[in-house]
Amino acid sequence: MNHFKRMSAVLMLALVAVLAMGVMVPVMAQDAAPVGECGAEGYTGNFKSIEAVDELTVKFTLCTPDPAFPSKVAFSAFQIAPSEHLTATNGGGPELFQNPVGTGPYKLDTWTQGSEIVMTRNEDYWGDKALEPTLIFRWNADSTARLTELQAGTADGIDNVGPGDFPVVEGDANLALYTREGLNVFYLGFNNTVAPFDNVMVRQAIAYALDKERIVANFYPPGSSAATQFMPSAIATGFTPEVEPFAVDLDMAKQLLADSGVALPIEVTLNYRDVVRGYLPTPGVVATDIQAQLAEIGINVTIEVMESGSFLDAANAGQLGFYMLGWGADYPDATNFLDYHFGEGASPQFGDKFAEITAPLKEAAQLADPAARNAIYVGANTAIRDLVPMIPIAHGGSAVAYRAAITGNPHSSPLGNEAFSV
């Protein structure tokens, strides 16, 4: 997709490629269709109307300006589909996913859920035809097993190389490693309505106690970094280097706990899900290390592992007081990180919201000038640091690996936008 033209809250988009797989479906010119009534009670969206100007042009009219909109509309999960197809597949769910429609270089052939997806070359593709006639994607949760398949030649490439396997791949002349920048964040979350985390001094004490560099050095792969803010530095708009994090200071942490009025030792439960992610490649050992670090300041942590779905539901509902979670970029803009987690429309996972955070986020989200936005984000990031709704711990680097014989193919997009047709 390209050729964005900004006109206040109106954007024109020339459609070059709409979806990633399927067959070509032309779009005919249609009058603007109202989506929602801006400012009306119950409507929280930002679309005023959407119009198909001609077969290759769509016009979006927004309620308020959104500088991140080009990034959002290019995000694969926000793909455009014909209304007839949405109606035929009941608007979503399994029917829509199993019957994709689009204009990409590959088409879905078969999908064995939990096992593999097979895609075949789309001979009617409008651009250069895909080099390989067939793509097969297989799942394996074990990073060691994935590497073994690559070494044995039963796989041409693997995703999410294990943290300890980077040197193994780099030392094998038959393999090639392609690293990704960490457009993600791992954080310790608090619900500020749950004792003792309703006391900001307790949250600040934990922030002073945690040695993030130690966690990254011991449990993360090369290319990772200790987080100074919730925003990764790779996304310039929203990351404000002048806002420095709390330095490791156990004496300060102990003093804050003493001044908090909370009786010591403090007994807390730390919840997490045992699921590997780029932002948290080794959940169990990281939880244990956090437990050990907090014991040094008089906080006794009981670790509780939860089933992934139940954990996410509980966190989003604000039912967990203290937990480990993270986020990976959907699109490279501050709104995807800051507004989603701390804005007015965010879930109650951190408890009550803070006006010192929500107000500047709302203002910055409507400005087009990056410098003007960042000037406002300084205040938001300062408030996030001082009020401690969570503690950002790490930005996890990751990598893919391929057989060295596969050339011109470093598919290592930090956003997961790999191009397998070239």
Image (cartoon, rainbow, N blue to C red):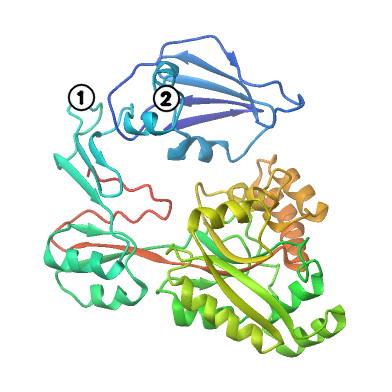
> Quick one: SS at disc 1?
loop
Estimate the x, y position of residue 245 in percent, counting from the top left: 68, 73
Contact, mark 2 vs mark 1 (Cβ under 8 Å):
no
**Residue positioned 28% across, 59% down in the render:** 140
Comparing labels 2 and 1, the label whose residue is closer to the camera: 2
Residue type of the residue flagged with mark 1: Asp
Where residue 328 appears, as percent x and y from the top left, is 50, 55
Q: Secondary structure at mark 2?
A: loop
Q: Can the viewer see residue 111 in this picture? A: yes
Which residue is painted at 75% across and 90% down in the image?
A: 251
Residue 247: numbered disc? none
Of residue 224 and residue 3, the one placed in the foreground of this image is: 224
> Residue 210 vs residue 272: left or right?
right
Residue 237 visible, this angle? no
Judging depth in this view, the residue of 285 and 393 nearest the camera is 285
User: How many residues crowd around disc 2 within 10 Å: few (fewer than 14), some, or many (20 or more)?
Assistant: some
Amino acid, disc 2: Ala
In the rendered structure, the answer to whether residue 41 lies left or right of residue 16 reads: right
Q: Is residue 311 left or right of residue 81?
A: right
Which residue position is annotated with label 1? 124
In the shown orientation, is residue 76 left or right of residue 256? left
All told, the count of numbered labels is: 2
- Would you call the spot at circle 1 few (<14 residues within 10 Å), some (14-19), or many (20 or more)? some
Q: CA distance from mark 2 to mark 1?
A: 18 Å
Give residue 1's quadrant in the image.
top left
Q: Which residue is mark 2?
A: 81
